[in-house]
Image (tube, grey):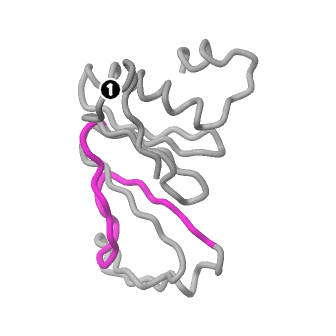
């Protein structure tokens, strides 16, 4: 957090396209000290980084039904969400059956905005001019 504050003085947080590359450089450094999974939000974007066991899912129309893994309760997401709703969920393990949860790669950083994965950097990304190659989603 101190490094972010030093990089962006003035108290106003920049938008995610400026923050994500900085996090991409800082987070592997922190991960060298052991298992490191992180969720960070600036109120506009959700930054998710995982060295172990992170999964994510995007929900949007048409919403379906899914069964919660811990209780067996079935939820009809179509009945509880509006036409324009979209969401991204990040967890350490899938929370439901019948939905396409996707595993993070070890060392992967993702940025989510408005319920979408908008940016991804894999740990094994090729270097371009000393900077990791970015894949925009």
Q: Residue at x 49, y 29 (%)?
A: 21
Secondary structure mostly seen in magenta is loop
Looking at the picture, how far across and down is residue 13, in whole percent?
A: 69, 29
Looking at the picture, how far across and down is residue 46, in whole percent?
A: 53, 45
Q: Residue 46 vs residue 68: left or right?
A: right
Q: Look at the picture and state if 67 lies above or below 20.
A: below
In which quadrant of the rendered view does residue 37 lie? top left
Q: Look at the picture and state if 5 lies above or below 71.
A: above
Q: Nearer the viewer, residue 121 or 54?
A: 121
Question: Which residue is at the far top?
Answer: 6
In which quadrant of the rendered view does residue 36 lie? top left
Mark 1: few/some/many CA within 10 Å (<14, 14-19, 20+):
few
Residue 86 highlighted magenta (yes or no): yes
Question: Which residue is at the far front?
Answer: 129
Give the residue at mark 1. 127
Q: Look at the picture and state if 25 lies above or below 87.
A: above
Looking at the picture, how far across and down is residue 86, in whole percent?
A: 57, 68
Q: Residue at x 58, y 52 (%)?
A: 113
Is disc 1 placed on a helix, strand or loop?
strand
Q: Nearer the viewer, residue 85 or 120?
A: 120
Quarter of the image for the N terminus: give it. top right
Q: Look at the picture and state if 3 lies above or below 50.
A: above
The span picked out in magenta is 85-107
Looking at the picture, how far across and down is residue 59, in whole percent?
A: 48, 70
Q: Residue at x 65, y 45 (%)?
A: 44
Q: Residue at x 30, y 49 (%)?
A: 104
Q: Residue 72 vs residue 137: left or right?
A: left
Residue 16 highlighted magenta (yes or no): no
Q: How many marks?
A: 1
């Amino acid at each position: 957090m101190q490094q972010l504050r030093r990089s962006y003085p003035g108290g106003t947080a920049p938008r995610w396209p400026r923050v994500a590359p900085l996090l991409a450089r800082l987070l592997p450094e922190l991960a060298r000290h052991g298992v490191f999974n992180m969720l960070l939000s600036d109120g506009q974007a959700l930054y998710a980084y995982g060295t172990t066991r992170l999964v994510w899912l995007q929900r949007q129309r048409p919403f379906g039904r899914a069964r919660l893994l811990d209780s067996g309760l079935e939820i009809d997401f179509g009945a509880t969400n509006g036409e324009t709703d979209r969401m991204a969920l990040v967890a350490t393990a899938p929370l439901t059956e019948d939905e396409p949860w996707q595993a993070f790669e070890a060392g992967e950083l993702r940025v989510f905005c408005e319920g979408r994965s908008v940016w991804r950097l894999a740990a094994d990304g090729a270097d371009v001019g000393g900077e990791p190659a970015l894949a925009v989603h």
